[in-house]
Image (spheres, rainbow, N blue to C red):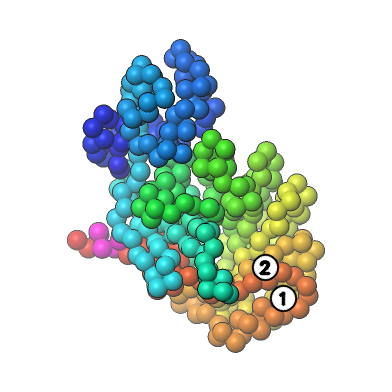
């Protein structure tokens, strides 16, 4: 881990101090108040970290030396080590990070698709991880092949965004929790990370530009709906009926399609953002046109948006993607009902961009060395 807290900014691999990237302004205000300061000091520190990109507490000249020393005594600013960056022809970049305990996680930087006139929007989306591995075992996903190791801390979630901004020299405008792990299974740390991401004192992204994707943890979907600062929601659906979804999503045995859509309707009743139904098209598994019709009916009733994704080949899994022609037919079947539908020809196919693939390769290489 990179440690920027000391006067010299020298590297430390492990620190017992708290990583300030996981601290909210309210947390920091409480800290300063308990040490004779005020919320003013918290405001200035957050301004220095997230607006001025200061990475050494000793360089924050808007607070006195007393409080700079206090920060150095109690906190660090740590970013994960970048082990590998894979760039692709479409400028998507995949980052493999190593955490302080030697574990690996992945994040992906996805620039906006060029517009029809050849220009490119300024949108920069980062797909972040929320756990090391995953316990939910979605059958198309490489993240769960090695099981769940642990949750990421709030700081480890935020540090992915900060590290990518610094490395790429691009300003992140959108965040999607679609990387490794099930975000809602790490709700406490996720919720705090969301506060930092959308806080005007933090990364200051518009709530509508932040999307949490879940495999379908019904109780936590309801809890997410009750956040004061609401964010967007995407559901890793991949089957419109229990019979089909059971083949792909083990979580469906705990909360079936009907229970899931009950929770989605509750979320929709509290949130102005349209829910996205993510549907990976897998040949011979869930790509029948009957599924397209049922999916369209459910999406229309929910007022949801359907995002179709041709299967991205994962080493170690035998499933295949349907032909482009069949994918388009499935899309057109859904779209014909009036449901807003897109088909994502995924970026980064040439850089192992499916969740967990780069991590698995690195783990295998490490084990063999």
Q: Where does residue 45 sit, x and y in percent of width and height? A: 44, 29
Residue 320 at least partly seen: yes
Residue lying furthest top in this view?
36
Q: Give the residue displayed 37% in from the left and 36% down from the top.
A: 54
**First reached walking from the N terminus: tag 1 or tag 2:** 2
Q: Is residue 198 left or right of residue 270?
A: left
Q: Is residue 31 above or below residue 176?
A: above
**Residue 306: mark:** 2
Residues drawn in magenta: 362-367
Magenta span contains residue 276: no
Q: Position of residue 246 (x, y in %)?
A: 62, 67
For the residues bearing labels 1 and 2, Cβ distance under 8 angstroms: yes
Depth check: give the residue in front, 205 or 256.
Answer: 205
Quadrant in the picture for the C terminus:
bottom left
Quarter placement of the N terminus? top left
Task: Residue 229 in the image: state x and y as whole percent.
Answer: 65, 41
Residue in view at x 31 percent, y 59 percent: 84
Look at mark 1 in the image and give the residue it sits on: 334
Seen in the image, is 219 located left or right of residue 20? right
Q: Is residue 363 magenta?
A: yes
């Amino acid at each position: 881990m990179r440690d920027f807290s000391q006067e010299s900014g020298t590297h430390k691999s492990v620190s017992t101090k708290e990583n300030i990237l996981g601290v909210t302004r309210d947390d920091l205000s409480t800290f300063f108040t308990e040490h004779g300061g005020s919320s003013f000091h918290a405001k200035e520190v957050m301004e220095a970290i997230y607006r001025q990109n200061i990475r050494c507490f000793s360089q924050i000249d808007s607070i006195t030396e007393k409080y700079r020393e206090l920060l150095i005594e109690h906190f660090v600013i740590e970013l994960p080590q970048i082990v590998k960056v894979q760039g692709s022809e479409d400028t998507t970049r995949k980052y493999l990070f190593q955490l302080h305990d030697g574990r690996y996680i992945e994040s992906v930087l996805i620039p906006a698709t060029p517009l029809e006139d050849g220009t490119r929007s300024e949108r920069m989306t980062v797909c972040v991880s929320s756990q090391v591995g995953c316990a939910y075992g979605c059958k198309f996903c490489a993240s769960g092949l090695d099981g769940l190791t642990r949750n990421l801390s709030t700081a480890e979630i935020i540090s992915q965004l900060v590290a990518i901004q610094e490395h790429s020299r691009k300003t992140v405008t959108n965040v999607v929790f679609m990387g490794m792990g099930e975000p809602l299974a790490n709700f406490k740390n996720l919720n705090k990370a969301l506060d930092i991401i959308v806080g005007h004192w933090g990364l200051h992204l518009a709530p509508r530009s932040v999307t949490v994707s879940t495999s379908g943890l019904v109780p936590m979907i309801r809890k997410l709906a009750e956040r004061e600062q609401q964010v967007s929601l995407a559901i890793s659906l991949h089957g419109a009926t229990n019979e089909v979804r059971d083949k792909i999503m083990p979580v469906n045995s705990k909360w079936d399609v009907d229970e899931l859509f009950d929770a989605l309707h509750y979320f929709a009743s509290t949130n102005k953002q349209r829910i996205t139904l993510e549907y990976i098209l897998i040949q011979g598994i869930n790509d029948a046109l009957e599924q397209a019709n049922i999916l369209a009916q459910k999406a229309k009733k929910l007022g949801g948006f359907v995002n179709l994704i041709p299967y991205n080949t994962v080493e170690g899994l035998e499933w295949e993607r349907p032909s482009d022609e069949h994918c388009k037919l499935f899309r057109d079947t859904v779209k014909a009902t009036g449901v807003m539908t897109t088909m994502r020809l995924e970026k980064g196919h040439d850089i192992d961009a499916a969740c967990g693939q780069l991590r698995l390769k690195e783990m295998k290489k490490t084990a063999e060395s």
